[in-house]
Each structure stands twice: as structure tokens, then as C-alpha cells.
């Protein structure tokens, strides 16, 4: 490995420093690109810091390399554990290590391997794709506590859709794992969960079929949705318990729940 900007006469010195850093960080195999960067940093620091502070340069590089190698080792172990797949949805592209909060120590017990799609939806709630998370029907049964925690949190976040609540009812977590899952407040808003109720007081869920109980003029569409019309595969308006959405005469419309009856 060559380090640009370092004199050839220092070759033996460079080799000794490299071996010393590797030995003190318990590294058997290293990422040459990362090692080259940290060693180059070491030699720069050796030139600019006072002699009495020469140990600072070594300690700095050693700490950086230790962190880099630990991250590499964690990623390698997670890849082996998961079979090179996202531990939530099973995708095998663009995988990244995710530290499950509020844990702060990066190790295989606190981390899971996620694809870009899952990671984006976890970190940006507004971008959530409900159907994507049907994958949890399988991954929630993982024996890995960190995977169980994330499955529980996501199902709680989307449980108003109906089917996630069914999965939650089947999911059992050990007491300490459940405490970890609840640590980010995912279940604190249970009492505020939006519920969509039909004209008979029956709870509506996403995917249900409802029947209109009166004629409804559809504004801007130029037609009337007739009483008795069946609206299949409805969607719930998450921020309004009085509204559902569905297709009538090929048009996607918003319907008041009080004018519907759930079809058995």
C-alpha cells in the first residue's frame, strides 16, 4: 500500500506504524482504503503537532480505525445473519446497518440490516406505503429482538388500517423486548387512534366493502352515487374519522361514513 506525499525514506517507519495500529486495534483484515486514509492523517498530524503531543496523532488514528473496523464487523455479521437480505422485507439491494433507538451502542444485538425503502419509511413517516409493510406478516416472527421491536413499532404506526392490528394481536414480545419497543412512544397515542364507524356503529377497516344508504351527489363529477351502491376495497382517511375513500362509477371519491353500511 502506497501513501502519496510520504517520502520513501520513511517506508520502514510507515510499515511499523501500520503494524502497530493494526495490532492495537485487534484487526486481522482491514479495508485498505480506510486504512490508507487514517494512516495518511496520522503522518500529517505527526508533522503539525508538537513533539510532546505525538501520541495524540497515534491515538486519533487508532480510535478512528477501531470505529471503522467495528462498523465493518457488525455489517458483516448482520449480512451473515440475514442471508444478505433486509431483515424486515427481504429485499437484497442497498442494505444498511440500522441502530434501533433508543439504543446507543452499535452491536449485532441492537442493530438490524435494512434496505433503502424500509429505512426511508421508518425515518420519514409521511412516505409510508401501507402495502409494503405486509412483509411484516413474516418478519414479525423473527427470533431477533431488534427485528421484533421494529415490526411492533411499524404495526402500531399503521394499525388503523385493520390488518396490522390483527398481526399485533398475534405478536408476543418478552417483557424486556416490549419495553424496548415502547421506549420511543409508538403506543402512547392509543386513546387518540382515529376510528371510522359506519351508520350502524360498526368499525370500518381498510379493504372493507360498504353500501351507500342514501343517494349522494358527487361534486365536480356530474353524477349521483345511488343508494344501494356497493363500494369495494375502501381506504381510510387517517386524519378524519368521518371520511373514507372508494371508487364509484370509475371515479375515486370521498364518502361520509354516516352514509355507509358495512357489507357482511
Image (cartoon, grey):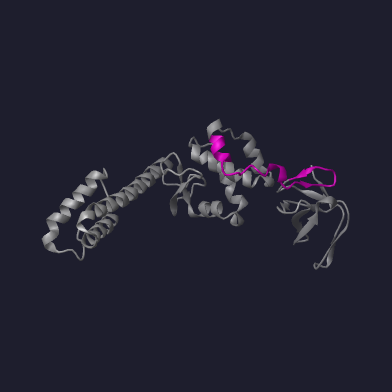
In reply to whether residue 202 is colored magenta, the answer given is yes
Which quarter of the figure has residue 48?
bottom left
- Is residue 84 visible to the viewer in this orientation of the structure? yes
Q: Position of residue 188 (x, y in %)?
A: 65, 43
In reply to whether residue 38 is colored magenta, the answer given is no
Residue lying farthest to the top in this orientation: 174
Chain part drawn in magenta: 177-204
Which quarter shows the C terminus? top right
Q: Position of residue 42 (x, y in %)?
A: 24, 57
Q: Is residue 240 left or right of residue 227?
A: left
Front-most of 145 and 132? 145
Residue lying farthest to the left in this orientation: 9
Mark count: 0
What residue do we see at 26% from left, 47% from top? 29
Which quarter shows the N terminus? bottom left
Q: Position of residue 100 (x, y in %)?
A: 49, 45
Above or below: residue 112 compared with residue 93: above
Front-most of 76 and 2? 2
What residue do we see at 52% from left, 51% from top? 118
Above or below: residue 224 compared with residue 81: below
Q: Is residue 219 left or right of residue 85?
A: right
Which quarter of the figure has residue 184?
top right
- Is residue 137 visible to the viewer in this orientation of the structure? no
Q: Position of residue 169 (x, y in %)?
A: 64, 35
Q: Is residue 22 left or right of residue 203?
A: left
Amino acid at each position: 500500500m502506497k501513501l502519496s506525499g510520504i517520502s520513501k525514506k520513511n517506508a520502514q517507519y510507515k510499515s511499523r506504524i501500520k503494524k502497530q495500529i493494526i495490532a492495537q486495534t485487534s484487526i486481522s483484515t482491514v479495508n485498505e482504503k480506510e486504512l490508507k486514509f487514517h494512516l495518511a492523517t496520522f503522518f500529517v498530524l505527526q508533522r503539525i503537532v508538537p513533539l510532546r503531543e505525538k501520541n495524540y496523532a497515534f491515538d486519533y488514528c487508532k480510535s478512528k480505525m477501531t470505529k471503522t473496523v467495528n462498523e465493518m464487523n457488525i455489517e458483516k455479521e448482520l449480512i451473515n445473519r440475514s442471508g444478505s437480505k433486509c431483515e424486515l422485507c427481504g429485499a437484497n439491494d442497498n442494505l444498511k446497518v440500522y441502530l434501533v433507538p433508543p439504543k446507543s451502542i452499535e452491536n449485532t444485538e441492537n442493530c438490524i440490516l435494512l434496505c433503502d425503502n424500509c429505512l426511508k419509511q421508518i425515518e420519514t413517516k409521511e412516505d409510508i406505503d401501507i402495502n409494503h409493510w405486509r412483509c411484516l406478516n413474516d418478519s414479525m416472527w423473527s427470533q431477533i429482538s431488534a427485528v421484533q421491536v421494529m415490526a411492533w413499532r411499524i404495526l402500531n404506526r399503521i394499525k388503523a388500517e385493520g390488518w396490522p392490528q390483527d398481526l399485533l394481536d398475534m405478536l408476543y414480545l418478552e417483557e424486556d423486548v416490549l419495553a424496548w419497543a415502547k421506549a420511543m412512544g409508538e403506543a402512547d397515542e392509543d386513546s387518540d387512534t382515529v376510528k371510522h364507524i359506519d351508520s350502524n356503529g360498526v368499525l370500518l377497516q381498510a379493504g372493507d366493502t360498504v353500501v351507500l344508504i342514501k343517494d349522494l351527489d358527487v361534486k365536480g363529477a356530474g353524477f349521483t352515487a345511488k343508494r344501494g351502491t356497493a363500494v369495494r376495497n375502501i381506504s381510510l382517511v387517517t386524519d378524519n374519522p368521518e371520511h373514507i375513500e372508494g371508487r364509484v362509477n370509475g371515479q375515486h371519491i370521498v364518502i361520509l361514513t354516516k352514509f355507509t353500511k358495512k357489507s357482511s
